[in-house]
Image: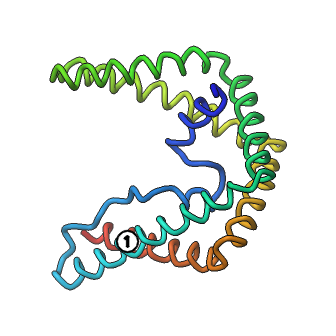
């Protein structure tokens, strides 16, 4: 369980490896709100809604694909290898994982107390912890053996998703296109 939690701390920040998983994650893109014209704003909102629908559909395909025991086993093996590599890179990660859990609970308590100062300090600490995980994860994924295992897992995941959702490739392509359009729309604001 600690392996999954540690990799999840890093993954929630930068996603599971590769372009496929980045597109499967739930939507978190900024909604364009200040486009120059009402027509441009309406068009951008349409793109955003379509992107949300695609993301939901890809997430469902991802979840259905992971019902395959072999794919779940490949995922587990990859995550364990990534976890071991991250620990070799930064041996303090297990301690920091415990601290991240404590900080999370302390943040909830500070919010309940409406203690802005404590919340700010805890938020800064959490950002530092997350940065350590992100750095270790990036360094681990740059190692040839881990990168190859990530590629093999992503290929297997893509094949699994295509078995349960034959339009996976088209959905991924459309998702990329919509993200580019939204990025351009946001940069023009």
Q: Quadrant of the N terminus?
A: top right
Please state which of residues 146 and 158 is positioned toward the viewer in this rendering: 158
Q: How is the image coloured?
A: rainbow
The quadrant where residue 134 appears: top right
Please tell me whether mark 1 sits on a helix, a strand or a loop.
helix
Q: Which residue is label 1 attached to? A: 182
Q: Is residue 23 left or right of residue 38?
A: right
Residue 182 appears at what percent x and percent y? Answer: 37, 71
How packed mark 1 is, by other alpha carbons closer than 10 Å (few <14, some 14-19, many 20 or more), is many
Q: Classify 46 as above or below 94.
A: below
Task: Name the residue: 56% across, 48% down.
Answer: 15
Q: Is residue 182 left or right of residue 147?
A: left
Q: Quadrant of the C terminus?
A: bottom left
Task: Name the residue: 63% across, 34% down.
Answer: 4
Q: Classify 30 as above or below 162.
A: above
Please state which of residues 141 and 7 is positioned toward the viewer in this rendering: 7
Residue 99 appears at what percent x and percent y? Answer: 48, 16
Task: Name the residue: 57% across, 37% down.
Answer: 8
């Amino acid at each position: 369980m600690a392996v999954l939690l540690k990799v999840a701390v890093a993954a929630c920040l930068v996603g599971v490896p590769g372009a496929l998983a980045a597109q499967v994650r739930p939507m978190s893109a900024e909604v364009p709100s200040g486009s120059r014209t009402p027509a441009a704003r309406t068009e951008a909102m349409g793109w955003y809604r379509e992107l949300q629908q695609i993301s939901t559909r890809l997430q469902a395909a991802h979840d259905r694909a992971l019902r395959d025991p072999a794919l779940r086993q490949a995922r587990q093996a990859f995550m364990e290898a990534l976890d071991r590599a991250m620990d070799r890179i930064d041996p303090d990660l297990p301690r920091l994982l415990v601290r991240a859990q404590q900080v999370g609970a302390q943040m909830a308590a500070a919010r309940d107390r409406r203690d802005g100062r404590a919340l700010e300090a805890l938020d800064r600490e959490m950002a530092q912890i997350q940065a350590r995980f992100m750095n270790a994860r990036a360094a681990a994924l740059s190692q040839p053996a881990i990168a190859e295992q990530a590629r093999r897992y992503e290929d297997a995941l893509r094949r699994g998703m295509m078995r349960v959702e034959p339009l996976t490739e088209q959905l991924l392509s459309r998702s990329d296109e919509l993200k580019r359009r939204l990025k351009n729309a946001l940069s023009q604001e």
